[in-house]
Amino acid sequence: MAVAETGMSSLEAELPQRSARLILRRLRASDLADFQAYRQDPQVGLYQGWQAQSDAQALAFLQEMASAPLLQPGAWCQLGLAEAGSDRLIGDIGMCLAADSASVEIGFSLHAARQGQGLAAEGVGALIALLWACSPAAEVRGITDARNLGSIRLLERLGFARVDSQAAVFRGEACVEHHYRLLRSAQVAR
């Protein structure tokens, strides 16, 4: 079973995906102002692999993600998290299917004003359900800086188990990264 035939097309067919308060959907050019509102916030980006971008760079990224193939082994792609009532973008979730399709790594960003309300967990939980349905991956992985307590709480709330901690250098600074995983056989908390 080829991921390009089964995973990518079936995940695309499931979008947009609605939860109680969110819509998990493709990013689009019209999201630019909302995207920049949280992606240019230094606190939101503190532990992220991405850097703030100019409007032109962010627009190009949004346009690329609007039609990027989903679940291509070895390639990151982003989906938007939007408010269910207004469809206004409040965050995004990145995912990368491993080259061997055995796992998917995820990362997430949420507007600072919307943090602490369970929205990121709701969105990540919705994505995980889709990944189980639309990919051959046996596990979902998350890597976070040990100082990123919000991300640690979110991963653990969803049933991820810490499997490793490693010394790392992030943006020129020594740190510790915690590695988490959620097995397909584990039940995702909602």
Image: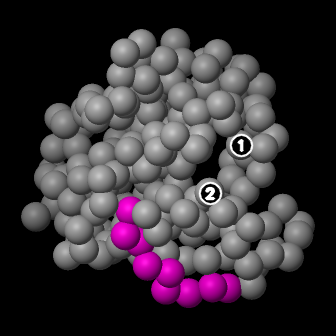
Q: Secondary structure at mark 1?
A: loop
Name the spot of residue 34 as percent of width and height, x first.
61, 20
In the image: residue 64, left or right of residue 125: right
Three-letter residue code for mark 2:
Gly
Which residue is located at x 54 percent, y 28 percent? 90
Among the two numbered marks 1 and 2 on one chain, the one whose residue lies closer to the N terminus: 1
Look at discs 1 and 2 and give the one toward the viewer.
2
User: Is 179 in front, or is 50?
Assistant: 179
129 vs 117, nearest the viewer = 117
CB atoms of marks 1 and 2 within 8 Å: no
Q: Which residues are magenta?
A: 158-166
Q: Distance from label 1 to label 2 (Cα)?
A: 11 Å
Q: Which mark is residue 44?
A: 1
Q: Is residue 159 magenta?
A: yes
Assign a secondary structure to mark 2: helix
Task: Give me the residue at 72% from left, 20% from top.
Answer: 55
Colour mapping: one colour
Answer above or below: position of 32 versus 132: above
Residue in front for this viewpoint, 20 or 101: 20
Is any atom of residue 71 visible in this view?
Answer: no
Counting other residues with Cα less than 10 Å from the Cα at mark 1, is it few (<14), some (14-19), or many (20 or more)?
some
Q: Residue at x 20, y 76 (%)?
A: 185
Residue denoted by label 2 = 150
Relative to 55, does residue 39 appear above or below in the rendering? below
Magenta span main SS: strand
